[in-house]
Image (cartoon, rainbow, N blue to C red):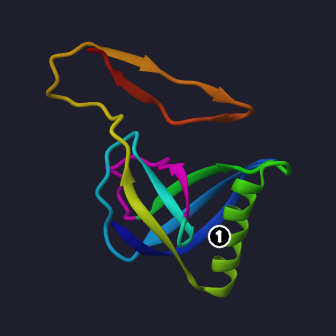
Amino acid sequence: MTIKCKVKSKTPLACNTYKILLSPEEKVQFQAGQYLMIVMGEKDKRPFFIANAPSNEGDDLELHIGAAEHNAYAIEVVEAMKLALNNNSEIVIDVPHGDAWFRDDSKRPVMFNCGWYRIQLYPFHFEILH
């Protein structure tokens, strides 16, 4: 589902990592571990994990985007967020995506899997074992 969002803030978390707060025009239903796609163009959608919990008190969506100088893919998204914030314009997201979330009612064992990429800790993923 595509939804328009206002960019509420862009805050540096580290030298090349930014916290982006998006305010969607309608409440977004998602599970922990899912991601959204930033629509940069008709055939250009870029995936980023949703950093906040689904039970977040507000309706905002939080992203943590690592955008080092050599990573044009992410830098272009951060620049688009900055432009939308400065111009009070909207960006478009496609959400939710991904099937890697914890299911409370599952009888299967759970394997906890997480990883580091440079200084950025990606959200935790649960992989259901068969």
Q: In which quarter of the view is residue 60 placed?
A: bottom left
Three-letter code for the amino acid on which mark 1 is drawn: Met
Q: Which residue is mark 1?
A: 81
Among the 4 quarters of the image, the one containing residue 26: bottom left
> Horizontal and vertical percent for residue 121?
61, 33
Residue shown at 59%/24% (left/top)?
115
Residue at image position (38%, 59%) is 95
Type of secondary structure dominating the magenta stretch: loop
Q: Is residue 118 magenta?
A: no
Q: Return the x and y of residue 42 as percentages of the image width and height.
A: 53, 72
- Check disc 1 and report its element: helix, strand or loop: helix
Most foreground residue, 40 or 9: 40
x and y percentages locating residue 13 in the rendered image: 71, 49
Q: Is residue 100 above or below residue 70?
A: above
Percent x, y of residue 108: 21, 15
Query: Which quadrant of the figure contains the C terminus?
Result: top left
Nearest the viewer among 22 and 47 is 47
Residue 48 shown in magenta: yes
What segment is highlighted magenta in the picture? 44-59
Residue located at (53% from left, 52% from top): 47
